Image (cartoon, rainbow, N blue to C red):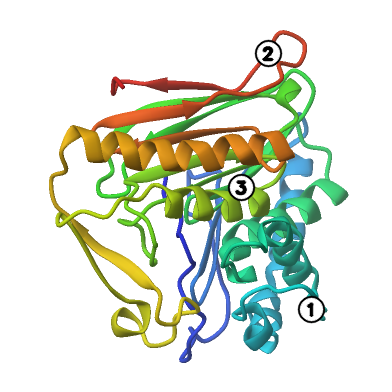
C-alpha cells in the first residue's frame, strides 16, 4: 500500500462527477472523483447491513471534493500559531490531524487522503451494524474493527506491487488508521524513505504522521537528488522546499543515519500520543517503532521479510 507525503494536488480540470462501481463478483465498492479514489469493503452478519453501509458511503462521498476545493487556499497554507477558519468536516479532520505538528512545516493537505477515508468510514458505521470495514484511499486506510475482529494489511513497496511483509491489527489495539509515505509515492517528499508505515487512532492522524516521519528519514549525500518543489510540480503546497527526485545507492552509514532520524521523530510522536507504531524502510533496511503500550496482551505486529 502507498500513500502520499503530500497528496496529489486538487488542480482543475477534475473528472466530471463522481463514479461508483461494483463489478460482478466483487464485494468491494469503488468510489472515484478527481484525485480521490476509494476502495471500500464491509463485513457484516446481515447482507442488508452491507448494502446499507455502501449506500451511506456513496451518499457521503457526494460533494466531498467540491467542499475541499472551496477551502483549498487555506488547506494549502502552512499552519502557524492560529488555526485557520476551516469549515467543512473533512477539512476540520485534516486540521485536527496536522495541528499537533505545527512547529514544523506542515499544511492540512498532509492529511487529506486519510481524512476523506475517515469521513466515509464514519458515515457507514453510523448507519449500519458492521463487524469489520475499511476505506482505502490510495493506501491511506481507515479501519473499523468490532470486538474480537482482526485485520491483516499487506506491506508493499511504493516502487512496486510486491509484498514485503504484513501488518496485523486486532480490535483491542484501538487503532483505526494506517498510512504509508515515501519519496517514491505519487506525491512529493522532503525525505528519502522508501516507505514509512504508521498506525494511529485514525487515518488522518496516520497520514499526517507518516508524512513527517518520512520527511525525517533524511541525509545529505551526493546520492540524494533534489529539486525545489515548484520546479517539480507548479501547484504544490511545498513551494520552494527541496524535494527528493531520486536516491542512488547509499552507503550503510548514511542509511543508518537517515533511519535514525526518522525513528527519533516516530518515537517522539509515540510519546505525545500522536501515533501507536511505525515501520521505516530504506534500501533494504527497516526500523520499527514498536507500540509503547500493550492492551489486553495484544499489540500491533509488523511481519517483515527484510532484516535490519
Dot 2 crowding, Cα within 10 Å, few <14, some 14–19, many 20+: few
Say left or right for 208 vs 44.
left
Q: Residue furthest top?
A: 297
Q: Which mark sits nearer the N-terminus, 2 or 1?
A: 1
Which residue matches tag 1?
86
Residue sitting nearer the eye, 105 or 201 = 105
Quadrant for the C terminus in the image: top left
User: Residue drawn 59% across and 70% down?
Assistant: 109
Residue 283 position (above or below residue 292): below
Q: Which mark is residue 298?
A: 2
User: Residue drawn 44% across and 86% down?
Assistant: 235
User: Residue drawn 71% across and 24% down?
Assistant: 173
Quadrant for the N terminus in the image: top left
Say left or right for 105 vs 245.
right
Considering the numbered disc 2 on the image, is that residue within a helix, a strand or a loop?
Answer: loop
Distance from disc 2 to disc 3, alpha carbons, whole Å, reads: 20 Å
User: Residue drawn 73% across and 38% down?
Assistant: 273
Considering the numbered disc 3 on the image, is that residue within a helix, a strand or a loop?
Answer: helix
Q: Residue furthest bottom?
A: 13
Residue sitting nearer the eye, 87 or 130 = 87
Q: Position of residue 18 (x, y in %)?
A: 58, 76
Q: Position of residue 124 (x, y in %)?
A: 77, 51
Which residue matches tag 3?
206
Q: Position of residue 192 (x, y in %)?
A: 32, 52
Q: Which mark is residue 287?
A: none
Proximity of marks 1 and 3: CB atoms separated by less than 8 Å: no
Question: Quarter of the image holding residue 296?
Answer: top right
Say left or right for 167 vs 186.
right
Residue 131 in view of the camera: yes
Considering the numbered disc 1 on the image, is that residue within a helix, a strand or a loop?
Answer: loop
Dot 1 crowding, Cα within 10 Å, few <14, some 14–19, many 20+: some
Amino acid at each position: 500500500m502507498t500513500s502520499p507525503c503530500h497528496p496529489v494536488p486538487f488542480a482543475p480540470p477534475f473528472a466530471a462527477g463522481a463514479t461508483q462501481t461494483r463489478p460482478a463478483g466483487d464485494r468491494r465498492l469503488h468510489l472515484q472523483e478527481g484525485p480521490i479514489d476509494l476502495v471500500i469493503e464491509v463485513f457484516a452478519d446481515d447482507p442488508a447491513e452491507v448494502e446499507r453501509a455502501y449506500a451511506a458511503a456513496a451518499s457521503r462521498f457526494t460533494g466531498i471534493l467540491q467542499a475541499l476545493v472551496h477551502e483549498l487556499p487555506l488547506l494549502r497554507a502552512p499552519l502557524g500559531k492560529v488555526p485557520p477558519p476551516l469549515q467543512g468536516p473533512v477539512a476540520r479532520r485534516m486540521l485536527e490531524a496536522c495541528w499537533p505538528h505545527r512547529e514544523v512545516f506542515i499544511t492540512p493537505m498532509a492529511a487529506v487522503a486519510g481524512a476523506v477515508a475517515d469521513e466515509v468510514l464514519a458515515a457507514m458505521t453510523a448507519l449500519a451494524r458492521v463487524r469489520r470495514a475499511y476505506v482505502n484511499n490510495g493506501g491511506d486506510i481507515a479501519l473499523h474493527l468490532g470486538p474480537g475482529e482482526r485485520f491483516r494489511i499487506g506491506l508493499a513497496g511504493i516502487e512496486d506491487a510486491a509484498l514485503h511483509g504484513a501488518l496485523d491489527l486486532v480490535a483491542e489495539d484501538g487503532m483505526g488508521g494506517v498510512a504509508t509515505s515515501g519519496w517514491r509515492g505519487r506525491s512529493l517528499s522532503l525525505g528519502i524513505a522508501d516507505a514509512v508505515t504508521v498506525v494511529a487512532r485514525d487515518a488522518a492522524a496516520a497520514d499526517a504522521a507518516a508524512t513527517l516521519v518520512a520527511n525525517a528519514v533524511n541525509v545529505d549525500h551526493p546520492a540524494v537528488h533534489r529539486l525545489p518543489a515548484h520546479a517539480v510540480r507548479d501547484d504544490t503546497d511545498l513551494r520552494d522546499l527541496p524535494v527528493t527526485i531520486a536516491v542512488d545507492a547509499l552507503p550503510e552509514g548514511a542509511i543508518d543515519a537517515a533511519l535514525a532520524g526518522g525513528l527519533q521523530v516516530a518515537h517522539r510522536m509515540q510519546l505525545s500520543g500522536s501515533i501507536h507504531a511505525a515501520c521505516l524502510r530504506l534500501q533494504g533496511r527497516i526500523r520499527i517503532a514498536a507500540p509503547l503500550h500493550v492492551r489486553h496482551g495484544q499489540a500491533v505486529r509488523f511481519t517483515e521479510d527484510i532484516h535490519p
